[in-house]
Amino acid sequence: MSLVEKMANLNSRLVYVILIIVTLIPVIWPAPLPIKLTPQHEAIYNYVENLRPGDVVLMSAEYTASTIGDLNPPFVALTKHALKKDLKVIFVS
């Protein structure tokens, strides 16, 4: 009996259990991934930190569906940071 035949005869429940276990492993024990800050990240953080409460910030959401995965998380983080600093935020798109 070849390997292909053995795999074809496997019980589908066993395959699903294996898939569930393999999928849950990174959820239960996530791999520590380093987050590296660039000078640009530090510069924008320091810029927002130096603003006074009540200052006006204009934020533009000029990205498309193809770039939303890359551009939306920093946009949300910057928005939260500005709102925590009690800045007046104006959004344009």
Image (cartoon, rainbow, N blue to C red):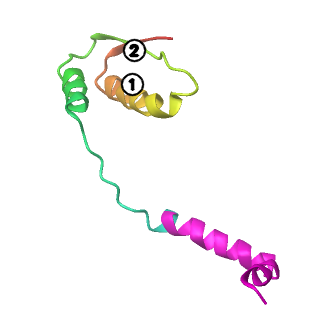
Secondary structure category for the residue under label 1: helix
35 left or right, relative to 64: left
- What kind of secondary structure does the magenta stretch mostly adopt? helix
Q: For the view shown, which residue lies furthest in the front direction?
A: 2
Indicate the quadrant where residue 81 lies: top left
Q: Callout 1: 10 Å neighbours few (<14), some, many (20+)?
A: some
41 left or right, relative to 2: left
Question: In this picture, which residue range is highlighted in magenta?
Answer: 1-26
- Give the label, 2 or 1, closer to the camera: 2
**Amino acid identity at mark 2:** Met
37 left or right, relative to 76: left
**Amino acid identity at mark 1:** Thr
Q: Are marks 2 and 1 in contact (CB under 8 Å)?
A: yes
- Which label belongs to residue 79? 1
Q: Which residue is mark 2?
A: 59
Q: Residue 20 or 57: which is nearer the viewer?
A: 20
Secondary structure category for the residue under label 2: strand
Q: Residue 68 or 51: which is nearer the viewer?
A: 68
- Pinpoint residue 78: horizontal percent, then vertical percent: 35, 27
Q: Earlier in the sequence, mark 2 or mark 1?
A: 2
Which residue is depicted at the point 39% across and 14% down? 59
Indicate the quadrant where residue 77 lies: top left
Label 2 – label 1 distance at C-alpha: 8 Å
| Total numbered badges shown on the rendered structure | 2
Which residue is depicted at the point 47% across and 29% down? 72
Q: Is residue 32 magenta?
A: no
Which residue is depicted at the point 20% across and 31% down? 42
Which residue is depicted at the point 69% across and 75% down? 17
Q: Is residue 19 magenta?
A: yes
